[in-house]
Amino acid sequence: MKVSNGMNKAEVKIRAEKLRSQIDDLRYRYHVLDDPRVTDEVYDSLTVELRQLESQYPELATPDSPTQRIGGKPLDKFVKARHDVRMLSLNDAFSEEEMREWAARIRKLEPQASWSYMCELKFDGLATSLLYEDGIFVRGATRGDGLVGEDITQNLKTIRAIPLHLRLSLQHASGLPQALRHRVLGSIRKAKRIEVRGEALMSKRTFIDLNQAQKRSGLAEFANPRNAAAGSIRQLDPGITASRKLSWHAYQLITDLGQQTHEEEHLICSALGFPVDRHSKVVAEFEEILVFRREMEKLREKLPFEIDGIVVQVNERRSFERLGIVGKAPRGSVAFKFVARKATTVVEDVIVQVGRQGNLTPVAVMRPVKVGGVTVTHASLHNQDEIKRLGLKIGDTVIIQRAGDVIPQVVEVLPKLRTGKEREFRMPRMCPVCGFKTKRQIISGDARGAATICTNKACPAKNLRAMDHFVNAFELYTIGPKIIERFKDEGLITDAGDIFSLKKEDIEVLERFGEKSAENIIQSIDDHRRVSLSRFIYALGIPHVGEETAIDLAQHFGGLEKLMSANREEIDTIPNIGEAVAKSIHEYFQQSQNRKFLEKLKRVGVTVLHEAHLKSATGPLAGKKIVVTGSLESMSRDEAKAAVRAAGGDWVSSVSKNTDYVVVGAEPGSKADKARSLGVTLLNEKEFLKLIKP
């Protein structure tokens, strides 16, 4: 059978294969090798021809064909995607002093180790994870909470900088040392799945063009390239994402392909077909880090993409892994941010907000000004002592900055620009919401001075914010702040406990609600009556108790009753809980109004689920390090973690020669392969359950 261009099917197949190879080679040269001879016109022309051939013979189209970058119908919503390996964030440093403190801390942990540092640009984009199976791109996801993100595969496929298939033969990888090449090729043959992480970006030029188009269409302009990139990558319609012309840079290779340093991760990523930071540099001495940062800050404005600092990481992989993780960030790397961008504006007023703990916070209302691409109109002044330190008056011209290019701060007053019409500001003696007296109170650990608090325990402002915090902790997302305020104004609720007594008939009669929205709210409430102890503790809004402290308390006490009856001394013995926090927790449960509230929650059907205690010293896994890869049928990942700890084991995230068992579930990642190569014992789910429940 002949086609219109005179080729038969066999000839079309050969031509299509050559076109795909040529197009991928052009993509690699443009995005990875930065070859200026490659033009969009040539790339597009070859892609048009390939699309025509594949439309004539659809069976010849392959999943990794460049014609498949844009396809499929718009999504209704994004589905969740669980990461095989947790996506961590980075701790920030803003000064040379903070960097020296970081270097001293990690050196103290590994005093005998020898390492270098790799410095690279910190791109200001959206962190994403790419997963390849047998070299083909199969899934892309956002970071999310580090454990579970959103599947944005179709949108990431539209980004030409992302290869749809990896260059597993390492062609054009002339920069790869021979010894590393042998290691990588050997590892590639064993690795069914390869994961690479990086940053989705929008160039400065594309950002300008996009905003001009938005303006012509009468649409809102984006604040900065990062916001534009994040908004583009989360479009339900891949066609919109494709039109935004995003780019992508790899910064981390998750799969073990024989890399021994972070520098080798970049080399391997480049060889596989990913663009990487060409400015990255390995340095031996700390002082060279400071030189690199100064050089990049000078270069910042000339770069095609926005950066907000550099990332410094211990280059040697073994040392980096031994340093471990603190909170949600690796100890062995840090984001060294640039000096905050500054601007001047006028403070037109100072208003006071009342927080859920009763703290009165003065907030500067400023003449709108752009700082680092974002329009700033408000900035917290923290308390009266901070205002006094600044010498600030209403009407003053001030210098503001965005710390870490994010949080607006007033850093200096310019008194020489005063006109004489400026006014002093004093914290109110009465709460602006309820009219009760306020008082100054020293807050432990706050270096900015004393807080002003409302003395009314039933202050409506405190109550509203406490309820908002409570429903968020319970993940009752159908009930937002405005709905809470409406229910309160209508007399339906006085505290969070009343939410669980609401009936559909109470809600559907309200203006702008109706039967369907009432049903959705009531169903959501019923679905969330059962809650884990850690979420419940966090929901209570106990001063100084965040999510991590709530987890520590839940794991230590196991049940609410034991926590309520605990004395300060016992609470103080829990790791990461100091004297001030222990005092706050103990006082909360001693106060009669709080105990009445807890009883009320019990009466309206809120069930607090018990949590496993800290690991047993005598359990079947006592002293054992356990890794779980893949999904288990009988329990969630959190349940598996709790089961390991209850059995005395240590739950660890990465496989090493010190790992005792690797539990292999459905669709395991590369951890299973690494365990085999290290001789670590593998357990299937049945064997794991038998071990923890003999």
Image (cartoon, rainbow, N blue to C red):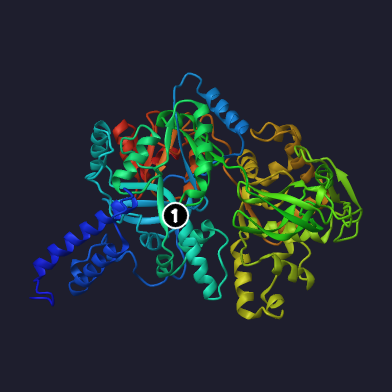
Residue 17 visible here:
yes
- Residue 684: percent from the left, percent from the top? 34, 43
Task: Write the residue at 42% across / 35% down.
Answer: 281
- Compared with 304, 690 (above or below) is above
**What amino acid is labelled 1 in the image?**
Ala
- Compared with 443, 214 (above or below) is below
Task: Write the residue at 48% across / 25% down.
Answer: 285
Which SS class for mark 1?
strand
- Compared with 259, 547 (above or below) is below
- Residue 38: percent from the left, percent from the top? 29, 56
Instruction: Please state which of residues 218 and 161 is positioned toward the viewer in this rendering.
Output: 218
| Quadrant placement of the N terminus | bottom left
- Residue 556: percent from the left, percent from the top? 63, 38
Residue 642 visible here:
no
Q: Would you name the residue on which mark 1 appears?
A: 200
- Compared with 643, 46 (above or below) is below
Q: How many marks?
A: 1
Instruction: Please state which of residues 286 and 568 is positioned toward the viewer in this rendering.
Output: 286
Question: Which quadrant holds residue 81?
Answer: bottom left
Q: Residues within 10 Å of mark 1 (few under 14, many from 20)?
A: many
Instruction: Please state which of residues 389 and 14 is positioned toward the viewer in this rendering.
Output: 389
Considering every residue shown, the one lying at the far top of the view is 112
Task: Write the residue at 62% across / 67% down.
Answer: 478
